[in-house]
Amino acid sequence: MKILVTGGAGFIGSAVIRHIITQTNETILNLDKLTYAGNLTSLEDVASHPRYSFIQADICDAESLDEIFSAYEPDAVMHLAAESHVDRSISGPANFIHTNIVGTYTLLEAARRYWGSLDRERQQAFRFHHISTDEVYGDLLHPDDMSEDVTVLPLFTEETAYSPSSPYSASKASSDHLVRAWSRTYGLPVLITNCSNNYGPYHFPEKLIPLVILNALEGKELPVYGNGDQIRDWLYVEDHAHALYTVLTKGKIGETYNIGGFNEKKNLDVVNAICDLLDRIRPGATSYRSLITRVDDRPGHDRRYAIDATKISKELGWEPKETFETGLMKTIQWYIDNKKWVENVKKGTYQRERLGLIK
Ligand SMILES: NC(=O)c1ccc[n+]([C@@H]2O[C@H](COP(=O)([O-])OP(=O)(O)OC[C@H]3O[C@@H](n4cnc5c(N)ncnc54)[C@H](O)[C@@H]3O)[C@@H](O)[C@H]2O)c1
């Protein structure tokens, strides 16, 4: 298969590319605009591989997309390009509407034009895989809200109604609706996945886990929103990459698959776990927990997310390999061992060095 991956220079996209290039025989064209979140140094391990190539392009640019589809002739699209940081969506929602909604629409239309030009056999084999988030479902009952009448904590299933809370999740929900409409109206063979919070190597340090690891290593404050009791369901990024390839190759056309690690954790417990692991492997004079600082809660902050990943496990045989403890240890060790990547990101060098890395 020739796979067109959008957003392949981002956190999850680069994990998907590393997974597919090293574990399969598929060929990849990485299409990425290289926003602040796109970092080609995350792909150095595979950059010179003969089955990998890169093109800098914008999913909102229909003309470029048409040229890329006709020149590359992909058998599948894995669409990960997006604006992805909730806090940025609150301070500046416009980019989120543009990239996540208009961009997905533009990509769907380019894919439809290209798909319509294929012979019947290639049309049937073609897949448009849209990668989305569990945040489209809104939030769930929190253990603190349980009572005598409510004793079971619900999970997000593929049938849960959409109820997004932030500009980010609303824009992703819109893009999911567009993808379903293109399947139903035009017959485009689509797959949709909704995943829980990812963590792991090459994660941009604005997100909770890398931020806490790096701040702790530098002896800086560890910010926790509100009382830190918000619950997220964590999945190691390489397990997500494996799940996405499984859905692409084995998933049923038109279906949605929820992906999660069955790892519900309160934010404060995540931060404590990082501190405790660092206390073991990098002990200081006092525990890293002493650096924890409460900051004002994010407006509209969802209290609990939790994915029911039974469908992908039963129907496609996918299971996460990492527990939260093993994945977190690998992640901490990666940030300790990869100071060059971290410095590169912090100083913005990766943005200046781009030209030399593009092939
Ligand atoms: N990070 C998570 O925990 C998580 C969980 C579930 C789903 N997702 C979804 O997975 C996808 C990837 O997430 P991520 O964390 O890797 O994001 P990221 O922000 O790390 O990467 C996004 C990538 O998209 C590129 N991009 C942005 N706008 C573009 C445009 N207009 N044209 C082409 N490329 C563009 C960026 O340059 C970057 O390389 C997103 O769609 C996100 O909604 C993320």
Image (spheres, rainbow, N blue to C red):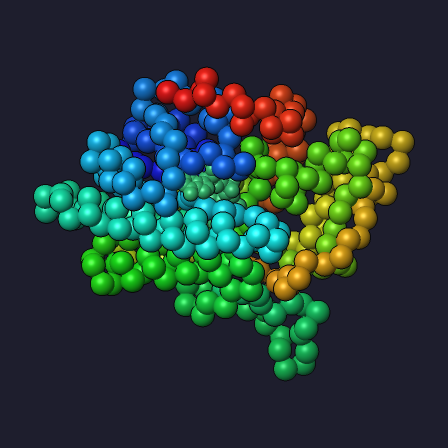
Residue 7, picture quadrant: top left
Q: Relative to 44, is 149 on the left or the right?
A: right
Q: Position of residue 165 (x, y in %)?
A: 56, 64
Q: Is residue 14 visible?
A: no
Q: Residue at x 30, y 29 (%)?
A: 27
The quadrant of the picture occupied by the N terminus is top left
Q: Residue at x 27, y 58 (%)?
A: 182
Q: Count the marks: how many? A: 0
Measuring from the top left, give residue 80's x and y in whole percent: 42, 44
Question: Foreground: 106 or 135?
Answer: 106
On the image, the x and y values in percent for residue 88 come to 59, 49
Figure quadrant of the C terminus = top left
Residue 327 image position (x, y, % from top left) = 59, 39
- Residue at the farthest bottom position: 149
In the image, residue 213 sits, relative to residue 135, either above or below, namely: above
Q: Residue at x 54, y 27 (%)?
A: 351
Nearer the observer, 37 or 231: 37
Q: Is 154 above or below relative to 127?
A: below
- 295 lies left or right of 184: right
Q: Is residue 306 left or right of residue 335?
A: left
Q: Nearer the viewer, residue 307 or 216?
A: 216
| Vertical position of residue 284 compared to residue 140: above or below | above
Q: Can residue 222 be seen in the rendering of this structure?
A: yes
Residue drawn at 41 percent across, 68 percent down? 159
